[in-house]
Amino acid sequence: MAEENIIYVGKKPTMNYVLAIVTQFNNNVDHITIKARGKAISKAVDISEITKHKFIQELKYGNIKLETEVVHGDRGDSNVSSIEIILTR
């Protein structure tokens, strides 16, 4: 899996990510992985749904992976939920 086929969801506006995904698929990419952690999980779901329903209707969900990651921070370790959504043509 190529690194450019991964979209990491953060604090940018939702439509920035949607545009990035649509651009990738217009460049003949077979699949894209959307990754998010914590509060960005709901945004990742929104991004995939907007892309699928409004822009590229033939997209399918390949695999959806849910995990809990341990993040080491200043206040010690904490568990953070994460999601990985694969969109395919």
Image: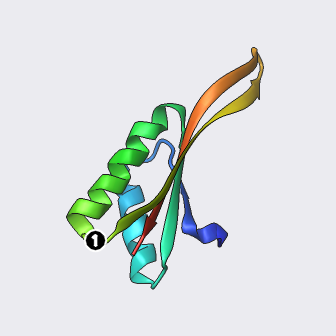
**On-image quarter of the C terminus:** bottom left
- As drawn, is 72 to the left or to the right of 36? right
Task: Give me the residue at 28% from left, 73% from top.
Answer: 58
Amino acid, disc 1: Ile
The answer to whether residue 46 is seen in the rendering is yes
Q: Residue 49 in the image: x percent, y percent?
A: 30, 54
Crowd band around label 1 with a 10 angstrom C-alpha radius: few (<14), some (14–19), many (20+): some
- The residue tagged 1 is 56
Q: Taking 39 as reference, is 44 above or below it?
A: below
Frontmost residue, 17 versus 62: 62
Q: Taking 39 as reference, is 50 above or below it?
A: below
Scheme by which the image is coloured: rainbow
Task: Give me the residue at 56% from left, 69% from top.
Answer: 5
Q: Residue 65 in the image: x percent, y percent?
A: 55, 48
Task: Give me the residue at 69% from left, 21% from top.
Answer: 78
List the single residue furthest toward the bottom: 28
Q: Residue 19 in the image: x percent, y percent?
A: 36, 65
Q: Taking 73 as reference, is 34 above or below it?
A: below
Frontmost residue, 25 versus 87: 87
Task: Give me the residue at 45% from left, 84% from top.
Answer: 27
Count how many numbered circles sit on residues in the image: 1
Q: Taking 61 as reference, is 59 above or below it?
A: below
- As drawn, is 36 to the left or to the right of 48? right
Q: Residue 22 in the image: x percent, y percent?
A: 37, 71
Secondary structure beneath dot 1 equals loop
**On-image quarter of the N terminus:** bottom right
The answer to whether residue 85 is seen in the rendering is no
- As drawn, is 46 to the left or to the right of 63? left
Asked which quadrant contains residue 66, the reply is top right
List the single residue furthest toward the top: 75
